[in-house]
Image: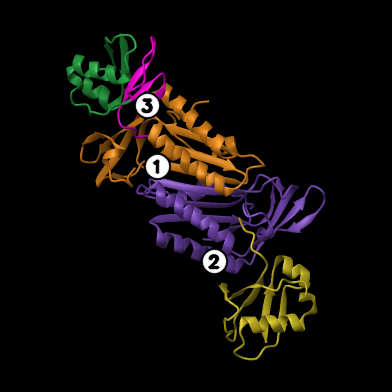
Chain colours: A orange, B purple, C yellow, D green
Amino acid sequence: MSYLTDSPLTIEPLLDEVRSPERGGIASFLGVVRSELGGRAVLRLEYSAYREMAEAECARVVAEAEARWPVKVGLRHRLGTLEVGETAVIVIAAGGHRDEAFLACRQVIEALKRRVPIWKREHYADGGLDWVDPGALAPEQG
Amino acid sequence: MSYLTDSPLTIEPLLDEVRSPERGGIASFLGVVRSELGGRAVLRLEYSAYREMAEAECARVVAEAEARWPVKVGLRHRLGTLEVGETAVIVIAAGGHRDEAFLACRQVIEALKRRVPIWKREHYADGGLDWVDPGALAPEQG
Amino acid sequence: MVTIRLFAAYAELVGCDTVDIAVSAGATIGELLSEFRRQVPAAAPLPSRLLCAVNLAHVLPSHVLQPGDEVAILPPLAGG
Amino acid sequence: MVTIRLFAAYAELVGCDTVDIAVSAGATIGELLSEFRRQVPAAAPLPSRLLCAVNLAHVLPSHVLQPGDEVAILPPLAGG
């Protein structure tokens, strides 16, 4: 099983991986390529990663969430070139109740953004091209 | 558009209703029929509603979330007989960023459970049959 | 005369989906519920606090009824 | 000799994916980074604080290197 993929992401297959009759609450998050960043029109994004470490760090993030809450976590991040509107990441947390599902889902996407070595380069409509540094954006951006 | 349906729920069509190039963060919640409640094995659930009011209240819940946060909300609740593992409700909140998506999604499922006139009767493996009263369960149940 | 709609567990307990209750003009939901309990013996097992809706929206017991209102008594909600 | 892997913006800036840096046995990541800046002029534009990983896990500058470690310098993370 790999947390990274070069293929388009859809939620149903990942949902099927975490569903079970004991898990009545399933929270999920999809990160989608937005059409603008910091006021500039975005055409597409190129995601790259330190693949071996990203896989290892995703596994740790998932294991930590599953140890902290009674949930099963599904996680996939896409790499390569993504057009505006395409899904870059999916996190799913399935638990007995919605509290733990929401908390674990949120925790995993926050940890992924903070810890997993993935980078993106944005291609702007004005012809520009920039590596994205979330720390350089306004706090609520990204 | 109706918030209630008698057909099986899948997330993709509802996702397509709320996706847009400006909405980079999509949080969702699926409520699934659990195999046990209060220690008793459940076979299936029968959902019924005060349909006209449930539609009106769902519309109010969605409008309130969309007024409070910059999000587009999708909401569907299934009625009729559902087997264990089937999806009873889907909430999706799509926003520019994940904060508002998570907050709105959580708010809508909490408001639905508190305000929308829907009822369920559980059929147990031991042959019993009970109307569910979430207030009579332990606080974190349901 | 006000028609009260009943649902789910309460419709089963009382044995019908609607009941007609005679109340004076300008009565509140609280007064309607008192009349309902007096005129319908099968309502005895219902809890003392009842959730009510008028015209498809939740209301408090102090809500004053208008002619033509659609009134409903709602069992504990269990959606989701 | 330690091989440092570079990625994304940093690989572009420095102009290569790996650089070999000579350090003494028992050096820390902080000492390796100082050597890296001294031995590789192209590293000058990199920020003063650099995120590092050893053997596929994040480490602090005080981390002591072992023979055979896989060392990486990571640009600001931007997944999701």
**Callout 1 secondary element:** strand
Chain at tag 2 = B
Q: CA distance from mark 2 to mark 3?
A: 46 Å
Report the magenta residues as a range. Answer: D52-80
Q: CA distance from mark 1 to mark 3?
A: 18 Å
Depicted C72 relative to depicted B86: above or below: below
Measuring from the top left, give residue B62's x and y in whole percent: 48, 61
C4 relative position to B130: left or right: left
Kindly identify the amino acid type of the residue bearing the numbered disc 3.
Ala
Depicted B64 relative to depicted D38: above or below: below
Please give the name of the residue rendered at 63% of the width and 77% of the height, measured from the top-left corner: C71
Residue underneath mark 2 = B57
Residue underneath mark 3 = A49
Is residue D53 on the magenta stretch?
yes
Kindly identify the amino acid type of the residue bearing the numbered disc 1.
Val
Residue underneath mark 1 = A32
Number of residues whose C-alpha sits closer than 10 Å to that of mark 3, classed few (under 14), some (14–19) or many (20 or more): many
Kindly identify the amino acid type of the residue bearing the numbered disc 2.
Glu
Camera-nearest residue between D59 and A12:
D59
